[in-house]
Image (spheres, rainbow, N blue to C red):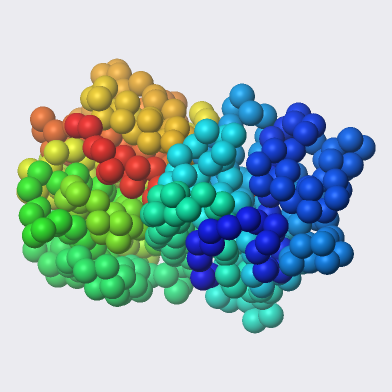
Amino acid sequence: MRIEIRIGAIQEVEADAVVVNLLEGVTTPGGATAAVDRALEGRISRVLAAGDFRGRLGETMVLYTDGRIPAPRVILVGLGPEASFNAEKVRHAAAAAAQRARELKVRQLATVVHGAGRGGLSPEEAAQATVEGTLLGLYTYHRKKENADRQGPEALLLVEFDATKEAAIAAGARRGEILARFVNRVRDWVNEPASDMTPRRLAEEVSGLAHEVGIRAQILDERQIAALGMGALTAVSRGSEEPPRFIILEYAPEGRLERPVVLVGKGITFDSGGLNLKSEEGMLTMKGDMAGAAAVLGATLAAAALQLPGPVVALAPACENMPSGKAYKPGDILRALNGKTIEIVNTDAEGRLILADALAYAARYNPRAVIDVATLTGAAIIALGQDVAAALFSDHDELAAALLRAAEATGERLWRMPLWEDYLERIRSDVADVKNSGGRYGGLGTSAMFLKQFAPEGVPWAHLDIAPMDMAEKARGYVPKGGTGYGVRLLVRYLEDPKP
């Protein structure tokens, strides 16, 4: 989609449709909405007086202008209550308006910058949220659908009357466009069939994007992985015909890679459960078990495109977990990169194994902080609910607080869970340093405690279990059904001002 900034009055813009807004409960339009209302000889006011539009978040109404303004249609969109208004509401409203425009087969869509007036957002923040909501809300996965309806607006015009705000709006729009681009690419990766989105294919796509944004990509193959001593990643991948890959992205502003933030993502491109085979129902969505890797790779690419000031490294171990005569078995003892041994009690607890090697590898960067992201446990979904929030574990309060702030700002919710030492007792092994599962009860906490054993010592570390958020059961606002791209915007927001 082409995005342009137009300075002038929205009621004078030539477009197939113009979008204005209204807060819930407002009975007299103001700002740009009032200007359009006057041009339409009070049509919006009459709709409000009749009670046909209340301004509920995402509510839309189409008014036909009959030649009174250049645009033939006005799309009125609700912003919800003023008391709870924020950038997240803008994203939802912008998505609703864009989706209505798509239904109308609008090619050129002009919109006010939602929230920059009475909403109280800065022009840059409002423009970013408007563009994000529009582009994320229009996303569809159509790579495999021959007759997919891909039609949507070709151009988005951000209209602002005050010329002094143009630079800020342009900066916000550019940022929103970059973030939406990489979120939507992550959605594509998660939605792709597992037979197509293999570890090698993921590595190839990431390498191409890294070249585009000008950062270093290194791809380790199965021989290099084994030579490093990554016994856990090697074992998990052994049952598959598809070889593993270890994907490394390094974003070094001005050539400096000192004390980076290291993002680690679980990249199981398909999880059958291994010899501890999943049920038919449990296996159906396992193409999305690489959503953690996709998120950290997408966030690092976005950080480079946005030219953030701090260095970032993404580590993504990628493989399949399959049953075969070569597959690793319950009772096996694996040695991870940091030398710790792991007793296998369940081959379906494989994500933490490949993360163990990647977390150990992170230590060589002398990182300022390490954050791992994974669709790790069904227990997270039971604890927090599907499509509600991801689980956050950290024993570093400042890092946890920074991530929670980023979650609040982006609408990608996190809920902090306890990391009690009691969980360590449940994963102690009689024959190895740890075992890879503490059993059904407390599985969310024991999985996090397992990962802690492999995180670099003395470095602030956090674990995000995004199993509740990687794939949505139904569309909601700017989040589509299927792959959500969760975590990209959250991580980028954190990277803008990482503390520690």
Query: Residue 37 at what x, y percent from top left?
Result: 78, 47
Query: Residue 167 at what x, y percent from top left?
Result: 39, 54
Question: Quick check: can you spot residue 115?
Answer: yes
Image position of 456 with respect to 74: above or below: above
Query: Residue 466 at what x, y percent from top left?
Result: 43, 42
Instruction: Kindly identify the residue that appears in the image at 31 percent across and 40 percent down.
Output: 494
Which residue is farthest bottom? Answer: 146
Which residue is farthest right? Answer: 50
Question: Quick check: can you spot residue 88?
Answer: no
* Number of marks: 0
Would you identify the image quadrant in which residue 376 lies? Answer: top left
Q: Nearer the viewer, residue 475 or 240?
A: 475
Q: Nearer the viewer, residue 86 or 67?
A: 67
Instruction: Kindly identify the residue that appears in the image at 57 percent across and 35 percent down.
Output: 119
Image position of 288 with respect to 375: above or below: below
Instruction: Kindly identify the residue that appears in the image at 71 percent across and 63 percent down.
Output: 17
Residue 485 left/right relative to 331: right
Image position of 140 with respect to 259: above or below: below
On-image quarter of the C terminus: top left
Would you identify the image quadrant in which residue 73 lies? Answer: bottom right
Would you identify the image quadrant in which residue 321 lies? Answer: bottom left
Query: Residue 112 at what x, y percent from top left?
Result: 61, 51
Instruction: Kindly identify the residue that appears in the image at 17 percent across and 59 percent down.
Output: 250
